[in-house]
Image: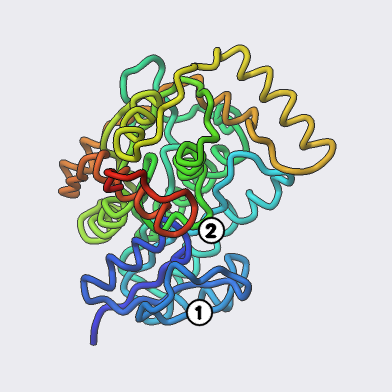
Amino acid sequence: MRDAAFVTGATGFVGASVARNLLAKGLRVRALVRPDGDTRNIRGLDVEIVQGGLDDLKALSAGCAGCRYVFHVAADYRIWVRDPAQMYAANVQGTVNVLKAAGAAGVERIVHCSSVAAVRPPRGRSPADESSAYRSEREPVGTYKKSKYLAEVAALDLATKGLPVVVVNPSTPIGPFDIKPTPTGKIIVDFLNGRMPSYVETGLNLVDVRDVAEGHWLAAVKGRVGERYILGAENMTLGGILKLVSELSGVPAPAFKTPYALAYLVGVVDTARCTLFGGDPIAPLDGVKMAAHHMWYDSAKARRELGFTPGPARLALADAVEWFRAHGYAPPAPSGKAA
């Protein structure tokens, strides 16, 4: 009988690539899907559906039963949220629920998809690695980062209590199947639609989402229990990323950089407006605060211990541009452009 794997978040951006990667390796894949979930990302795949959410202990138990591996990829990924309690419930308590269900089922390995949001960002432009740790839960900027930090703390604590948990920390994944899209995908979509007249300079570490999926598998078969592994590829400035997307897409890059002080002021006003009157901010203050750091990371540990070998960001960006255009998120390519 083929090995089985239970994947939470398989209908999302990273989870869809994890599910496809596991199927390509010959595993039977079981996926947790909310009753009202958008299943476009797994439509047509040979995946067994388990209906339920991260708060459904019965569904989690059924999903884990008989599996060799559990990949917990599901998360509420938004830069701004009106009700922080909802995000903590999904990202923190949901993580505890999944990992405990996996432990009770006696699975061989549990891979928890954390984020570089749980890694203390670098000071200056020297990339941070797994040794960079927050000193308290007060340090992470915003609800999302704090929730991912607390979820990772809970996961590593369960590892010390005997659960076979390995943590992976993707940096900034890009590529196909970004259906929402994610905050990073939205940057590309806005760019392609000419809705980015300026930008705030910052730094990001880009990585192909399919390489992140492979990193999950490598963590399952090679990772050390209780360790975390950054899954990243290339450190780039946002200006450099936009220039590259311009080359790939034929859409002119914005020429104006918004001064940080002005962006901060806009973030304060925009976030306050949405807090008082509803809607989602165009420039959430937490996002502006994050941009103050060049979020660059070093994946040497994953390369060394897991054999993680991510490809170039250029190819991932090209595939992302092509996917967004092919699926109606942006106008088709200008004449003479392949992407």
Residue 133: quarter of image: top left
Q: Quadrant of the N terminus?
A: bottom left
Three-letter residue code for mark 2: Val
Of residue 310 and residue 167, the one placed in the foreground of this image is 310
- For the point 32% across and 43% down, the residue is 317
Q: Residues within 10 Å of mark 2 (few under 14, many from 20)?
A: many
Residue reaching furthest right?
Answer: 277
- Mark pair 2, 1: CA separation: 18 Å
Residue 112, percent across and down? 41, 55
Residue 96, percent across and down? 53, 58
Regarding residue 314, the answer to whether it shows in the image is yes
Q: Is residue 264 left or right of residue 278?
A: left
- For the point 37% across and 40% down, the residue is 171
Give the residue pinned by disc 1.
50
Regarding residue 169, the answer to whether it shows in the image is no
Of residue 135 and residue 311, the one placed in the foreground of this image is 311
Label 2 residue SS? helix
**For discs 2 and 1, the disc positioned in front in the rendered view:** 1
